[in-house]
Amino acid sequence: MSGVNRRDFIKTSVAGIAAATTVGAAAKSPNAATKTEYPVVDVAPLGSLAPGAEVAFDYPDADSPAVLLRLAAPVAGGIGPNKDIVAYSMLCTHKGCPLNYLADRQMLVCPCHWSSFDPAKSGRLVIGQASQSLPSVQLDVADGMVRATGVDGLIYGRHTNIL
Amino acid sequence: MTRVPLPPKDAKTYRTVCQFCIVGCGYRVFKWPEGADGAAAPDANALGVDFREPQPADGEWISPAMHSQIHEKDGKTYNVAIVPDNECVVNSGMASVRGGGLAQTLYSPKRGTKVRLSTPLVAKAEGFDNASWNDAVDLGARVIKAVIDRWGADAVGMKFFDHGGGGGGFENNWAVGRFFFSGVGTRTASIHNRPAYNSEVHAAGDAGLVALTNAYVDAQLADTILIVGANPYETQTNYFLNHMIRNLNGESADLKGSTFPGEDAPSGRMIIVDPRRTISVATAEAAAGKENVLHLQIEPGTDIAVLNAISRIVLERRWHDVAFIKQRTEWQTFEAYQRSSLGADRDASEFVRVAAELAGVDEKDLYKAAEWIAKPKKNKARRRTLLHYEKGLIWGLKNYENIASIIDLALLSGNVGKPGTGVSRLGGHQEGYVRPPYPGGRPALNVDEAVHRGEAKVFWVGGCNPVLTTLRAEKMEATLKERGRPVRDALVRTAGRPVGERVTAVVEALKDGGMFILTQDIYMTATARHAHLVLPAAQWGEMNITSINGERRLRLYQRFMDPPGAAIPDWKIMALFAKRLNKLYQQDRNPLMANRFLDYDWRGDEDVFIHARYSFKGDGNDPPEGYAGITYNLLKDLGNNGIQTPVRLVNRVPVGTVRMHEDGKFFTPSGKAKFIAAPRPWPGYASAVERQRKNYRFWINNGRANHIWQTIYHHRHIDFYRERYPVPLLEIHAEDAIELGISAGDLLEVSNDVGTVEAMAYVTDAVKRNHAFMLFGQPRGAVGDLISDHVDPKTTIPYYKGVWADIKRIGPMPESAKTASFLPRNIAE
């Protein structure tokens, strides 16, 4: 359960940022088919993200927990100078339980039925009972701030990401 | 995808059961025309769920994988959503990774499944020509008739599915069995995954026990669950998660309390006998606490020794169930068992020490296992232990003695026929066996050998792919090529000629050692490429089928869409051939043979279902599949909870059977169970196996993985699954990997005296040193190519798990490694 505690701690420490900085501007979804407008949300200053950083935030709304991770190496789809920053929905795509992040393994694991996901491989299911990858939160950097701009993949429990 | 369409209120709804594993989870199917989507308000969608709000954890949700579009013969496009059924007691609304993607397996000309077979094919010089059913059946039936008339019925060889679920079911099994056994009358028959027509558990049958004794609820009631040679998190998923885990984590405490008032019944414990530390071990520990899980990480082939040692301890400590043994078993078999299997004349502690050393496990753990299985509880109540096994035992060192060792342990400890107990296969495919008796004897004829030796002049392969899965698979492919070539040449030479001329040319080729090959499948498999006639079958969802799961739960799997093109159900293909053979024999004025192919005028799926049940009486003496008195309408009413077979008719009302042997009766002439004595406590490796074991470093354990069903026939066409395992996985211990310069994602060459295959390295601590585990039956590297042709002489069952080979690094394969994940597959933290 150490993952949960660590997560909660960080969530508390950055809650102010995530909740308070929803920007009025909206970004086009990366998935043109949906034409849904996603909010642009500041997640964390780029300079504050040391290797191994883990920042909890909610996106695209308060019912949708997400996590930003700075991994140990560049990955496909990563942003930032080292292409190692990624973000995912923290709801398991099997039955919607909140995931734990095992920082030492760089692995997201569901405590309910133990589906696990690889944040370095686009949220791909490592093993388990989900039948889709974790939705990834699209990120960009503006004025030194890492921002969430959209979601690729359907978040658990929704028929559309923007309700 | 960031949106799924919702089924409207008036969507057509069906019930079905997953097409894949033995567990048979219930699903609901919604189908509605494109453009007629429902809306988020609860009264505007067929699920009745308020999608204006995000659903809570464990709520009802349509994931993108659960939806797809299909294009029907009426020219219209439909949406289909296939979602797990909350009301089904098997899965309680949970999907597995396979079942969650059922909608992706449906035929569509716009997805990967567009490569489905949709028309009969006849071989030409390279590849195939399209043919009508009429022409294909005429050619095939005439060749079969010529072969029966000239060489006899046994020259018609076959390898066919005999299971339930996708690619099977009572309907299709009945038609296949009737055609080959009552019609052709061949003994050269084999079952999809093995070279002969035999039980995988002859020893259980000889003991008087059925293969599937318990109900799934027994896993919630047991004090201890023993799992031997199985990895249920990955391969019997929702039985494990929805029943076993609920026991291990205490969720079933109330159920235990109400079922066993006054009995000491704490949360369950689990013993797992497996050479790997699988995710089943890790998740069991997470649910029960490490102190309540015992993992016996054995050396290959030593399960018999381990089980017999545990039994010896049970006997020695006087924990055996004397009353059960006296009343329910044949006493003289118990005495023989003690003498030979349990070495009763030898010192017990020495017996156990030898077994522990052989298996590479701690002696103390064998004593602990015996205690968890059989030590009486408070107030002398019998401990309730549920014993499960699957392919690790079945495809193990010596099939007959393997199965005997676990059946005997169950009988010794009285663990069958009572709530919370049982001794059962965990199962692979679902079941649905109903056929006239196989005309051959036991041990059954090795059909692979008959194919190699030239005795089979026809080889008809239905719903399986021996080029990937049989033993010495490479040799099978070589034989199909070599013996198929003269027949293909004959067909090429006579293309466009009258059928009589073509058949004469084919028969000439058969005389010269050729073999006429038919395959019947839904895809162009590696085996089908060598066929002369390819027959396109309908799949799950395109016909009504019925099957039973691992607790004998019979359900109707409703048809909800058209098959592609000219594809038809397997039963219909068999009927076309039977009717044609009937005509041909009539024309020949041979009523004796013509009459063998009568009564195939089934008008629909249910006609076959009803025809197949004729031998079931519902009087308590039916086989475990017996479904006397059951109709499709009744099954529709019963929904996804169905009825557990065998069905008894009480005042004509069908009554199911929750667990077998509860009446204390066993399927032997005396009605008492028999202990099956083995000649020795451990048989040792057969010489053919021992040679390989001595010459090659790595034991190549092999089997399935969570994502992938069997030969990846569906999943290779669906990105989510294929990208996860682009090349067959091979798990190797980290220290062995370092020694051989292997990194995760490297392409490996695995080779021995039988053949060479390729696999992708997964570096792990799940396997012991000098052990490896490889995904079986994969087109990009078939373990079958490494498996020797040794079989248990008593049962003709191969030792598929008994492969030794060397492993060599070929190099990195960055493109394939991109989509695979090399994180550990056994983490439950």
Image (cartoon, coloured by chain):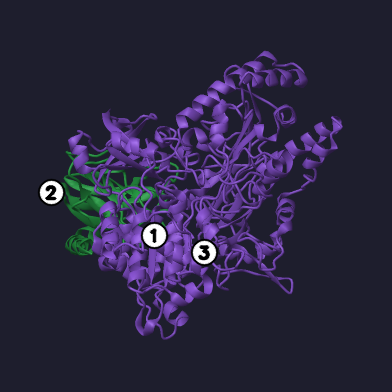
Which chain is disc 2 placed on?
A
The residue closer to the viewer here, A55 or B777, is B777
Q: Which chain is purple?
A: B
Q: Nearer the viewer, mark 1 or mark 2?
A: 1
Q: Which residue is mark 2?
A: A50
Is any part of residue A88 visible from this angle?
yes
Q: Which residue is mark 3?
A: B674
**Kind of residue at badge 1:** Ile
Q: Secondary structure at mark 2?
A: loop
Question: Residue, x 45% and y 29% (percent of image)?
Answer: B474
Q: Do callouts 3 and 2 point to residues on the same chain? A: no
How far is mark 1 from mark 3, CA to CA? 22 Å
Q: Is residue B608 left or right of residue B201?
A: right
Q: Is residue B49 left or right of residue B648?
A: left
Residue B235 pos. (x, y %): 43, 52
Q: Is residue B350 above or below residue B488?
A: below
Q: Which chain is green?
A: A
Q: Which residue is mark 1?
A: B227
Which residue is outermost to the top?
Answer: B493
Which chain is disc 3 placed on?
B
**Kind of residue at badge 2:** Ala
Image mark for residue A133: none
